[in-house]
Image (tube, rainbow, N blue to C red):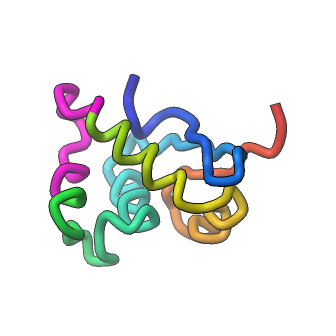
Amino acid sequence: GAPFYRSYVCKDGGFVAVGAIEKQFYAELLVGLGLATSDGQPVGDLGKLARVQMDKRRWPALHKLFEAQFLTRTRDEWAEIFMGRDACVTPVLSM
């Protein structure tokens, strides 16, 4: 599936849900993950990779990239980073 429409495990074993389908939400997702600057410029080679949202051939690599990024912080840290950011990323509180 799409790497920008799924849940990811975090450093503490908690989860975040990502639903950044539309272009503007995806752009905010990249900023929150540290893969793009606030003006949309990619950060390093990984940021360049992440810019191609709808290229299904790149989805496996994007999935691994996003997975690795989300594993660097706890669920609550990600919740704080994405609070007030229109990225369609929310903490999963229970299942």
Residue at (22, 27) in percent of width and height: 56
In the picture shown, does residue 33 fall above or below 52? below
Residue at (33, 77) in percent of width and height: 38
Q: Is residue 8 magenta?
A: no
In the displayed orientation, state which residue is furthest to the right. Answer: 94
Nearer to us in this view, 63 or 5: 63
Q: Quadrant of residue 83?
A: bottom right
Which residue range is magenta in the image? 48-60
Nearer to us in this view, 38 or 69: 69
Q: Quadrant of residue 53?
A: top left
Left or right of residue 75, residue 7 in this image: left
Residue at (27, 77) in percent of width and height: 39
In the displayed orientation, state which residue is furthest to the top. Answer: 1
- Most prominent secondary structure in the magenta stretch? helix
Numbered label tally: 0
Residue 67 spot, x, y in % from top left: 45, 43
Residue at (30, 75) in percent of width and height: 37
**Quarter of the image that includes the N terminus:** top left
Residue 73 spot, x, y in % from top left: 59, 62
**Quarter of the image that includes the C terminus:** top right
Q: Is residue 59 magenta?
A: yes
Residue 87 spot, x, y in % from top left: 49, 57
Left or right of residue 12, residue 55 in this image: left
Left or right of residue 64, residue 32 in this image: right
Residue 41 spot, x, y in % from top left: 20, 71
